[in-house]
Image: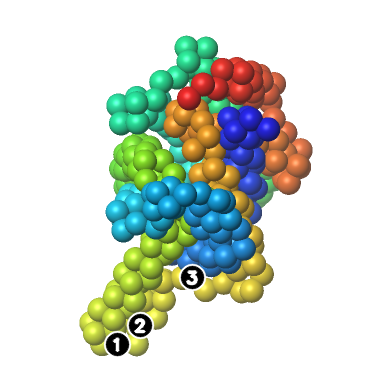
């Protein structure tokens, strides 16, 4: 099979696994009360163990198991410079970038973040041209635009549908409340008037929450946009300095170093908190701190770990392989098609109320058309 075709297939498959992992994580981690830092720490540490085990089986460098001369072996060896750049790539793309991305998910929700992520292919095209000297075929660029537009339509439709669903639920709740109120006695009506007066006193606190929500949304958008450039530059560094390693080794270095840094930060914060802690009340509050893992039962941890398998192990393994087979812009364009899978997987997992609309299906068809064009004109 042609390497570029295998790269495209790997990039497409990677996003399928990511979509499954997101669906598994969707409720479990949110209900746990865990922070973005805690999830990042856990997924990096657990996935690194997997990359280490698989690396021992399938080799860490591309020179192992292949007959090459001494000069080539030297160029393919583990060098301090290349490993250092991969660690820097992990720090930029995983620690800073993923923390920004996970926090944006918490503040904005998955649909809005995935919509913003559609800008990533264009930043990749710019970085690839400016730093890597890559060019994209005009037809492939048009396919990239079609794919991004399709993903945007799907994301906006999912956002609109979820808003309409919540609005209809509110209307049904209001109608049931009105019917109940009509059947009540005059004494109950007086209680209703009292409740109205009480609701006026709550209005000021609600407006404060709305203002806070608006600020959080602005911060979420800033984090989501910042993640695009961080993630793109992390991919550039990986492509520049990871060519001598297998995908398992690249991910072991990036996720392993990121995990160790976050473990160090977590331990340091615990020690500092322990010194400052003077009362039992503070110790209890410390359990929910951003640098600690949340309290979950074994079923919860199994679900989170299963999500790690899909999102942090299989997806990066395939994505990094694709990164070295096709142009950066094409790799990151195909890396943005997660909403297409989520559109149909949510229908399968959550039933009729998640059934995709005709507009969403049209957007998915547009994106698939763009992917087909990318597959035909996949020049590096």
Q: In the image, what residue occupies the spot 61% across and 74% down? A: 297
Marks 1/3: CA–CA distance? 21 Å
57 sits left or right of 95 in the view? right
| Mark drawn on residue 283 | 2
Task: Look at mark 1 in the image and give the residue it sits on.
Answer: 279
Q: Is residue 344 visible?
A: yes
Q: In the image, what residue occupies the spot 61% across and 23% down? A: 375
Task: Look at mark 3 in the image and give the residue it sits on.
Answer: 294
Q: In the image, what residue occupies the spot 37% across and 46% down? A: 241
Q: Which mark's residue is nearer the viewer, 2 or 3?
A: 3
Out of 55 and 32, give the one closest to the viewer: 55
Upstream in sequence: badge 2 or badge 3: 2
Marks 2/3: CA–CA distance? 15 Å
Marks 2/1: CA–CA distance? 7 Å
Image location of residue 265, percent across then percent down: 31, 69
Quadrant position of the N terminus in the picture? top right
Q: Is residue 370 visible?
A: no
Q: Quadrant of residue 230?
A: top left
Callout 2–callout 1 Cβ contact below 8 Å: yes
Label 1 crowd (10 A; few <14 / some 14-19 / many >=20): few
169 sits left or right of 103 in the view? right
Image location of residue 96, percent across then percent down: 33, 52
- At mark 3, the secondary structure is loop
130 sits left or right of 52 in the view? left
Q: Which mark's residue is nearer the viewer, 1 or 3?
A: 3
Image location of residue 11, percent across then percent down: 58, 37
């Amino acid at each position: 099979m042609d390497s570029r075709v295998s790269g495209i297939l790997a990039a497409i498959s990677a996003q399928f696994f990511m979509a499954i992992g997101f669906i598994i994580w969707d409720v479990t981690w949110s209900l746990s009360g865990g922070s973005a830092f805690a999830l990042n720490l856990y997924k990096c540490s657990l996935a690194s163990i997997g990359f280490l085990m698989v690396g021992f089986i399938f080799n860490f460098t591309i020179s192992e198991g292949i007959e090459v001369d001494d000069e080539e072996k030297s160029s393919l060896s583990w060098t301090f410079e290349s490993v250092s750049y991969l660690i820097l790539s992990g720090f930029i793309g995983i620690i800073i970038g993923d923390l920004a991305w996970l926090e944006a998910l918490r503040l904005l929700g998955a649909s809005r973040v995935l919509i913003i992520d559609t800008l990533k292919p264009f930043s990749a095209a710019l970085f690839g041209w400016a730093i890597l000297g890559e060019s994209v075929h005009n037809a492939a660029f048009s396919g990239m635009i079609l794919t991004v537009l399709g993903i945007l339509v799907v994301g906006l439709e999912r956002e609109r549908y979820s808003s309409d669903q919540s609005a209809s639920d509110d209307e049904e709740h209001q109608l049931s409340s009105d019917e109940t109120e009509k059947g009540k006695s005059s004494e109950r009506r007086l209680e209703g008037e009292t409740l109205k007066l009480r609701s006026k006193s709550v209005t000021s606190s609600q407006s404060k929450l709305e203002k806070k929500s608006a600020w959080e949304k602005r911060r979420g958008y800033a984090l989501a946009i910042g993640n695009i450039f961080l993630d793109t530059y992390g991919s550039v560094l990986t492509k520049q300095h990871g060519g001598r390693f297998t995908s398992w080794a690249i991910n072991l270095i990036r996720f392993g170093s990121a995990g160790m840094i976050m473990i160090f930060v977590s331990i340091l914060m615990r020690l500092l908190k322990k010194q400052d802690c003077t009362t039992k009340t503070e110790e209890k509050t410390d359990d929910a701190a951003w640098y600690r893992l949340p309290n979950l039962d074994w079923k919860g941890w199994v679900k989170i770990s299963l999500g790690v398998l899909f999102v942090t192990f299989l997806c990066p393994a395939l994505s990094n392989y694709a990164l070295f087979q096709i142009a950066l812009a094409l790799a990151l364009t195909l890396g943005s098609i997660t909403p297409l899978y989520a559109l149909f997987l949510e229908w399968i997992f959550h039933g009729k109320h998640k059934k995709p609309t005709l507009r969403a299906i049209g957007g998915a068809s547009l994106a698939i058309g763009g992917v087909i064009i990318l597959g035909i004109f996949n020049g590096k």
